[in-house]
């Protein structure tokens, strides 16, 4: 209990003991726990550790033996691949990578969502995306660029959250009517009080610093019902990034999403009024349950005028996301052509007059 009591059960950051309040407080996520609560949490964790199947421990050992880590010396990305991968390239900057060594069993995911979208379908989604955009750089749609689309298992922390939410507000209703030449309006105000214990399941946050967080959020949702217990064979033919952002690092993003979702839930229960003004809101994440899993993404980067553009296809649903580059040359030529056509049309109108 002693060792565990110094780590926050929510975000795993260090806890500090408050002599005044006699509580263990997390300065990172602002959680607070009594000594009794910490003892209960430690007891549960010890029980879970004792019940951990021997087979799972063996899987950790197998993962460490059969998974290689490749290092990109250009951008420092660390890529995981199975033993059948002799050499590869960095999915992010496309430079060659070199075998660094083995990865520790602590990086073994608990689950994986296998790819359900083939590479051909991913390329098709990319082509459909390009068809609707006239001002893309010419080489962006080349076959060489399509070859850079790689199947990447992105490391995600998927979190279940228990949230305590309270909200006070004033709801206003108005009623107007006309009698004779006079309009009457009645105003009513109601004190609204909401209090709820909210359970949110499956909030995702990627644990790879090289992948844009906004891009990964745009790829959602993923159907977790299709996940499988992690096994090495799912890496065959694909690559995976080793997480470099731990639970403490992603907790602010999880916390923000949990608070926003709970806030929207309480506000949605205040319908039926002309207007609602929130006067107080107290929403806190009280408990988190973390799962480390790999989610499937077809990923591509494109460098244009010293800026890196990232594109992704959800390897389960086929959803395509990304902001395309704009070819200034094509845009200028199109603008000049429109201007010339307008000038000619104006000249013809003048001649006709």
Image (spheres, rainbow, N blue to C red):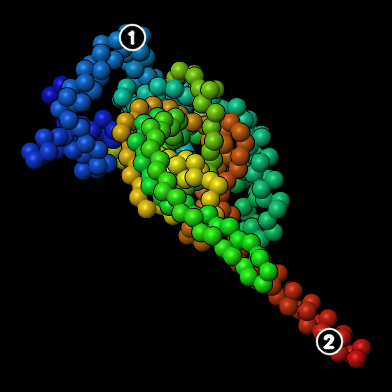
In whole angstroms, how far apart are the C-alphas of marks 1 and 2?
Answer: 84 Å
Instruction: Please give the name of the residue rendered at 74% of the width and 74% of the height, measured from the top-left corner.
Output: 338
Give the vertical position of 336 relative to 62 (above or below).
below
Q: Position of residue 352 (x, y in %)?
A: 92, 88
Q: Secondary structure at mark 1?
A: loop
Check disc 1: other Cα within 10 Å, few if <14, some if 14-19, many if 20+. few
The residue positioned farthest toward the top in the image shown: 54
Q: Identify which residue is drawn at 37% across, 19% down.
A: 63
Q: Residue furthest right?
A: 352
Q: Is 244 above or below relative to 308?
A: above
Q: Quadrant of residue 245?
A: top left
Q: Position of residue 329 (x, y in %)?
A: 63, 68
Compared to 125, does 52 lie above or below? above
Q: Nearer the viewer, residue 78 or 178?
A: 178
Quadrant for the N terminus in the image: top left
The residue to which callout 1 is attached is 53
Residue 71: tell me if it is visible: no
Mark 2 lies on a secondary structure that is helix
> Circle 2 is placed at which residue position?
347
Q: Residues within 10 Å of mark 2 (few under 14, many from 20)?
A: few
Residue beneath the point at 29% across and 15% down:
48
């Amino acid at each position: 209990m002693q060792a565990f009591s110094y780590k926050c059960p929510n975000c795993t950051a260090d806890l500090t003991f408050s002599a005044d309040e006699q509580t263990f407080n997390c300065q990172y996520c602002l959680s607070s726990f009594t000594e009794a609560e910490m003892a209960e949490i430690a007891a549960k964790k010890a029980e879970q550790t004792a019940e951990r199947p021997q087979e799972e421990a063996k899987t950790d050992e197998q993962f460490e033996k059969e998974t290689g880590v490749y290092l990109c010396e250009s951008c420092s990305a660390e890529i995981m691949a199975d033993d059948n991968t002799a050499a590869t390239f960095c999915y992010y900057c496309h430079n060659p990578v070199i075998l660094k060594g083995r990865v520790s069993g602590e990086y073994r995911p608990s689950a994986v969502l296998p790819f359900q979208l083939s590479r051909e379908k991913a390329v098709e989604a990319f082509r459909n995306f390009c068809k609707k955009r006239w001002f893309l750089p010419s080489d962006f749609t080349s076959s060489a660029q399509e070859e850079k689309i790689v199947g990447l298992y992105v490391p995600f922390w998927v979190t279940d959250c228990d949230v305590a939410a309270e909200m006070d507000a004033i709801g206003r209703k108005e009623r107007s009517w006309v009698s004779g030449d006079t309009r009457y309006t009645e105003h009513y105000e109601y004190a609204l009080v909401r209090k709820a214990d909210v359970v949110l399941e499956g909030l995702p946050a990627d644990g790879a610093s090289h992948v844009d967080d906004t891009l990964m959020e745009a790829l959602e949702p993923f159907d977790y019902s299709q996940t499988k217990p992690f096994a090495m064979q799912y890496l065959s033919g694909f690559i995976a990034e080793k997480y470099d952002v731990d639970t403490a690092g992603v907790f602010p993003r999880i916390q923000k999403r949990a608070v926003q979702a709970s806030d929207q839930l309480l506000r949605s229960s205040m319908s039926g009024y002309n207007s609602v003004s929130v006067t107080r809101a107290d929403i806190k994440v009280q408990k988190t349950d973390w799962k480390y899993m790999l989610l499937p993404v077809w990923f591509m980067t494109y460098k244009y005028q010293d800026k890196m553009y990232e594109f992704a296809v959800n390897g389960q649903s086929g959803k395509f996301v990304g902001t395309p580059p704009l070819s200034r040359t094509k845009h200028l030529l199109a603008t000049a052509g429109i201007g010339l056509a307008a000038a000619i049309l104006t000249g013809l109108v003048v001649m006709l007059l």
